[in-house]
């Protein structure tokens, strides 16, 4: 059989599978061989799921032979190792869950399986999704396929790196403050954080429950729409999931950029933004305008600046409560040689969690403690309401808000590891979107210093289709999404 072109998108593979050019099994085998070969360099995976993949591929082939199946039938996918998968180790990149095998699938994993997709493996991340570089992983850092001395971003760095490297065409990530969009930007692919409530969180290891969302990585808008369509929708098991119908996320693909109202807030182009990133963004704004988009530079989001501060109160507070469950008794890592029960619990947590996770637990416990609650947590919630209103008001005047995704291109491994504040600043532009709850997408829009630059588009609540329609329009007039990192190995 001819070698399979693994640089194809999911929809290109889907057409080839349907035409009988190759089987889902052959595609799965070729994909597994490629991602394993790449992983010596990238370390994008924590676990490969060969057995599951081949089983799913055979089922996909049977469905395809029967003329059944959908856009993802037989398509290889990577799954962030924060998403619970039945019978498959789910680690959250933590020693705490290093040997944890969930007895059930997260709702998104169930839906992915039902779509006919083929799970290739569980991808690397910052421990419990806390970080912006995938360096805080108990399984070692993931590398950026564009430059192996640089980070892929984080926390969903494994998913971003393997999609960028043409290992798998699509992958799932999670985004609490930027963990899909920022690594998508740093790796030169598309990453979308859905509206809070669009996708079920049930069975996903919890970080900050009022902010966490699962979403797709892909190389174009069509594949992102297919993956989001497969996992989105109301779930009675998650009380924060929205009881809304799931639209066809390609519904705005025909519209192009003509008449699209794009707001460009100067608040997001200030201090700290690298010149090369700013220039790539400005050129892209010109491309949008030249193709009929209406650029509005009058919208402002002054309070969104406070997003980072608000986030580093709310997210650690929720994390400190969510991570209280890792006590060495219920499941996960357990230190059994202590002097007494209390000592064993503290040894379990002391040895099981990494430094960044401990930092978050301490910050959150402090912010929630009696006497400080009103000053920090309550105040942060009030500012959160103001930020949400500000986004709503701006999005009455425009269809999408355009900002940089990250203030910088991919930075070097170890560069920010000892400076948590510098690390936190990476999410300056993505975090306000989680605080407000709106959907956001990052698209490749150019290069600076030979590294990819991402453009963030923010939409109205539950208007992911508008974002994907705009992304599709931009893809139609540029070819940034077709740029591939160097082949290795
Ligand atoms: N980098 C941010 C943090 O460390 C966001 C992480 C995320 O979105 N999961 O909390």
Image (cartoon, rainbow, N blue to C red):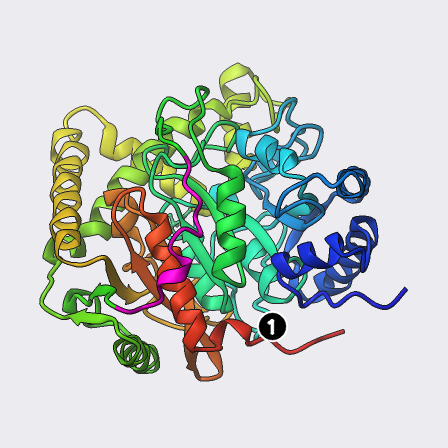
Q: Position of residue 238 (x, y in %)?
A: 42, 24
User: What residue range appears in magenta?
Assistant: 246-258
Secondary structure that dominates the magenta span? loop
View extreme (right): residue: 1
Q: Residues within 10 Å of mark 1 (few under 14, many from 20)?
A: some
Nearer-the-camera pick, 191 or 101: 191
Tell whether 226 sits left or right of 166.
left
- Quarter of the image where one finds residue 265: bottom left
Q: Position of residue 24 (x, y in %)?
A: 78, 50
- Quarter of the image where one finds residue 407: bottom left
Nearer-the-camera pick, 94 or 21: 21
Judge whether 448 appears above or below 469 on screen: below
Q: Which residue is mark 1?
A: 148
Query: Is residue 354 in view from this perspective?
Result: no
Query: Is residue 407 in view from this perspective?
Result: yes
Judge whether 243 appears above or below 260 on screen: above
Q: Position of residue 201 (x, y in %)?
A: 45, 32
The residue shown at (50%, 53%) is: 224
The residue shown at (74%, 68%) is: 5
The residue shown at (40%, 56%) is: 468
Circle 1: element type: loop
């Amino acid at each position: 059989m001819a070698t399979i072109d693994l640089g194809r998108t999911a929809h290109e593979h889907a057409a080839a599978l349907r035409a009988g050019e190759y089987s889902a099994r052959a595609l799965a085998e070729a994909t597994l061989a490629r991602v394993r070969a790449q992983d010596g360099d990238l370390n994008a995976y924590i676990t490969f799921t060969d057995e599951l993949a081949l089983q799913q591929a055979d089922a996909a082939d049977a469905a395809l032979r029967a003329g059944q199946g959908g856009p993802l039938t037989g398509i290889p996918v990577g799954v962030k190792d924060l998403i619970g998968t039945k019978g498959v180790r789910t680690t959250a990149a933590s020693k705490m869950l290093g040997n944890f095998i969930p007895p059930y699938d997260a709702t998104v994993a169930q839906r992915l399986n039902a779509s006919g997709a083929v799970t290739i493996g569980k991808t690397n991340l910052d421990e419990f999704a806390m970080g912006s570089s995938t360096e805080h992983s108990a399984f070692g850092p993931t590398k950026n396929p564009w430059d192996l001395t640089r980070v892929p971003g984080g926390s969903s760095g494994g998913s971003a790196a393997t999609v960028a490297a043409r290992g798998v065409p699509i992958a799932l990530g999670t985004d609490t403050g930027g963990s899909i969009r920022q690594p998508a930007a740093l790796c030169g692919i598309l990453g979308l954080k859905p509206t809070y409530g669009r996708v079920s969180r049930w069975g996903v290891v919890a970080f900050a429950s009022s902010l966490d969302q699962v979403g797709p990585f892909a190389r174009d808008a069509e594949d992102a729409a297919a993956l989001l369509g497969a996992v989105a929708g109301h779930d009675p098991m998650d009380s924060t999931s929205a009881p809304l119908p799931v639209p066809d996320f390609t519904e705005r693909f025909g519209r192009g950029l003509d008449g699209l109202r794009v707001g460009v807030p100067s608040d997001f182009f200030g201090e700290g933004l690298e010149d090369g990133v700013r220039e790539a963004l400005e050129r892209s704004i010109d491309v949008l305008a030249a193709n009929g988009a209406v650029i509005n530079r009058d919208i402002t989001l002054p309070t969104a600046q406070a997003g980072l501060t608000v986030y580093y109160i709310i997210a650690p507070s929720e994390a400190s409560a969510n991570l209280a469950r890792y006590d060495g008794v219920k499941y996960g890592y357990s230190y059994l040689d202590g002097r007494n029960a209390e000592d064993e619990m503290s040894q379990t947590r002391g040895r099981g969690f990494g430094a960044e996770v401990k930092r978050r637990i301490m910050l959150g416990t402090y912010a929630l403690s009696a006497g400080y609650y009103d000053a920090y947590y309550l105040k942060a919630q009030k500012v959160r309401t103001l930020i949400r209103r500000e986004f709503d008001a701006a999005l009455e005047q425009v269809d999408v808000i355009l900002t940089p995704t990250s203030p910088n291109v991919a930075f070097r491994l170890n560069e920010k590891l000892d400076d948590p504040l510098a690390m936190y600043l990476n999410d300056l532009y993505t975090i306000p979107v989680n605080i407000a709850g709106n959907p956001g997408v990052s698209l490749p829009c150019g290069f600076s210093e030979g590294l990819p630059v991402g453009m963030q588009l923010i939409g109205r609540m539950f208007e992911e289709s508008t974002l994907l329609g705009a992304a599709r329009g931009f893809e139609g007039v540029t070819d940034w999404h077709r740029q591939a990192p160097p082949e290795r190995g």
